[in-house]
Image: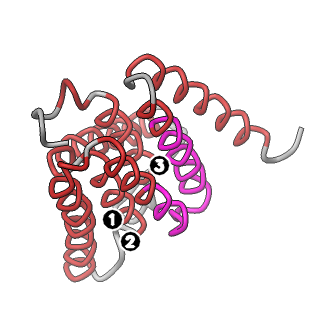
Amino acid sequence: MTRNAPLILTSLALLALVAISAMAFAPPGILLWFSLGLGALLVALSMIDLRTLTLPDPLNLAVFALGALMVWQTRPDAWPHHLIGAFAGYTLLVMVEITYRRMRGRDGLGRGDAKLLGALGMWTGWAGLAPIMLVASVCGLLAVGILSLTGRRTFDSTSAIAFGPFIALGGWIVWLGADYLLPAGLY
């Protein structure tokens, strides 16, 4: 078995979960296809971030572009909400990144995380940003807690953690649950 086998198997399992959850919760038709594309991109970004602590710009741009195409095809009247979501999502995490660097003298958040949240803001509109970050933050804290409690990894204030997978998870949950989580007409 190769060194990458666990990564490949995990990716395949996540892609299967994406397909199952999209078929269960995404509306049939074109939105299902858009959802499957989003899910595949989020899995790719997550696996790369877990391995390298980077979120490649071309994949973040693909999430953004696919989201823009989705808005254009399925909800053209909602452009303002989606453009504000993209801008606000990116700007919010850039401000966190800069503030942390100024306060602590070191990086605490990568710019790829900001680009991913901005791209997901294109999908969910501005109303989806808070729920995405809530899911991402809670899941990230739970993962760190579980890894610490089980002794699989120790963490301190300088530990690097891939936050992209948690943003991706939050974006996926909010996208699929938008009818239940977000006010009508704002996504």
| Mark 1 crowd level (few <14, some 14–19, many ≥20, 10 Å Cα) | many
What amino acid type is highlighted by mark number 1? Ala
In the rendered view, tell whether residue 142 sits above or below residue 55: above
| Direction from residue 83 to residue 172 in the image, left or right | right
The answer for how far apart the CA atoms under marks 1 and 2 are is 5 Å
| Rendered-image quadrant of the C terminus | top left
Disc 2 marks which residue?
Answer: 111
Q: Amino acid type of disc 3? A: Thr
Q: Residue 35 at x, y = what percent?
A: 45, 36
> Between residues 40 and 51, which one lies in front from this camera angle?
40
**Quadrant occupied by the N terminus:** top right
Name the residue at 53% across, 60% down: 59
Q: Which disc number belongs to residue 154?
A: 3
Q: Quadrant of residue 75?
A: top left
Q: Is residue 39 magenta?
A: yes
**C-alpha gap between disc 1 and disc 3:** 26 Å
- The residue labelled by disc 1 is 114
Point out residue 143 in the picture as x, y percentages from the top left corner: 41, 38
Q: Residues within 10 Å of mark 2 (few under 14, many from 20)?
A: some
Query: Residue 108's x, y, as percent?
Result: 34, 69
Magenta stretch: helix, strand or loop mostly: helix
Which image quarter: residue 136?
top left
Residue at left 63%, top 28%? 13
Q: Name the foreground residue: 139 vs 60.
A: 60
- Span of residues in magenta: 35-63
User: Are circles 3 and 2 on residues that touch, CB within 8 Å?
Assistant: no
Left or right for 115, reference 126? right
